[in-house]
Image: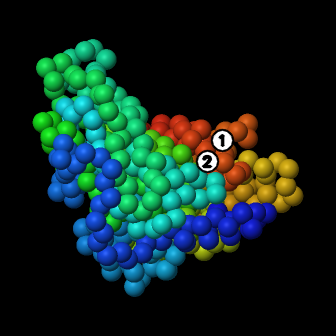
Amino acid sequence: MHLLSSRPTRRRFLEASAALSTLAFSPLAWRDQNQTDEITWYNAQEWGVEGKGFADTARYYDRLPARAEAQVRKAVWDLSRHSSGMSTRFKTNARSIHVRYRLSSQQLAMPHMPATGVSGVDLYARDEASGGAQDLPGRWRWAAVAMPRSQEVSTRLIRLIRPRANDAARDYLLYLPLYNGIESLEIGVDKQAQFTGVAPRPEKPIVFYGTSIMHGACASRPGMSISSILGRRLDRPVINLGFSGNGTMETSVGEFLVELDPAIYVIDCLPNMNAQQVKERCQALVDQLRQKRPKTPILLVADRVNAGAWLRTGSEEFHQGNRQALQAEYRQMVAEGRDNLHYLDGQELIGKDGEATTDGSHPSDLGMVRYADAYEPVLRRLLAAGQ
């Protein structure tokens, strides 16, 4: 994060993030500790993942297409190879669920973010509908998370699963790692179990472009990132284009944003910017999106306040300057007739009690929930207006 009074912290975080950029590995034999003769394995690529905006990627689980390597800065390209925001769905009546996957980086965790969030996969399941009807969807509820100890993960996520009535299949949702890349991913179930991969939904996604906060720092597990929480709450596909330390409203990234056809563009870049950069770049990015997507809502999100800003000289003023610059750009663009442009104030994104961050800058799970709480009513209104 770009904070006026915390450059050493930012430098350490960016160094840790850079170390998680993808590496090339030759295929290796699985060191599976499970009884594989009793498990049937399914490759997630066979039915696909949500959160993948481009088909022409260098590696299946990359977030930008292969051609982006020559167009965006190296830091953005390296970070785009993390699988943040991606998820895969399936149905099964299995009593146990296993997973095996290969990570692209051997750095599984960061000093302020656990391996479960950086490199884990996170399993959710739908419970029964509130009325008890079997043909209605219930809520997505957390089920299990992988705890990686090496680049090659092979583990049983959950066992002794309660069967549904008539042994019906249950819906599952598996989130991919936030700060690591995926080389391959398979889901395993009991041999006698039913299993169906669920293809990505056709609804237009919400596209999030932002910083390490949007990238997922510092959620304890992938399902607790801002975009993941909102995807569940709004029952909508999401595409996460958060780039740690590098969400700076660049038109080089905008070239790929315009290739997507989302329900909403969310631009949450201020934590990596200063007021002068906002003045220089905000309108250019909005106009770039508008030229290709003239009617798609664009939500500009203001800067949150660092939890320690009350104590550090200049910090509150820095955040206030960012917010004032963005608000000025927003008002000018609206006055000049740019339609369907919206603004979310940053004051309430992590609350005011100072209890919702890991390091003052990056939200903890509590902070992620508070971000989602602030986003949700605005996104609901924009989705309803677009129907």
* In-front residue for pair 16/295: 16
Q: What color scheme is it?
A: rainbow
Q: CA distance from mark 1 to mark 2?
A: 6 Å
Q: Position of residue 230 (x, y in %)?
A: 43, 42
Q: Is residue 218 visible?
A: yes
Q: Where 280 falls versus 228 (above or below)?
A: below
Contact? badges 1 and 2 (CB < 8 Å): yes
Q: Secondary structure at mark 2?
A: loop
Left or right of residue 102, residue 324 in this image: right
- The location of residue 169, given as percent across then percent down, is 18, 31
Q: Which label sits on residue 363?
A: 2
Residue 357 locus on image (x, y percent): 66, 46
Please give the name of the residue rendered at 87% of the width and 58% of the height, measured from the top-left corner.
Answer: 313
Tell me which amino acid carries mark 1. Answer: Ala
Disc sitting over residue 356 in the figure: 1
Residue 258 in the image: above or below residue 34: below
Q: Quadrant of residue 314?
A: bottom right
| Mark 2 crowdedness (10 Å alpha carbons): few <14, some 14-19, many ≥20 | many
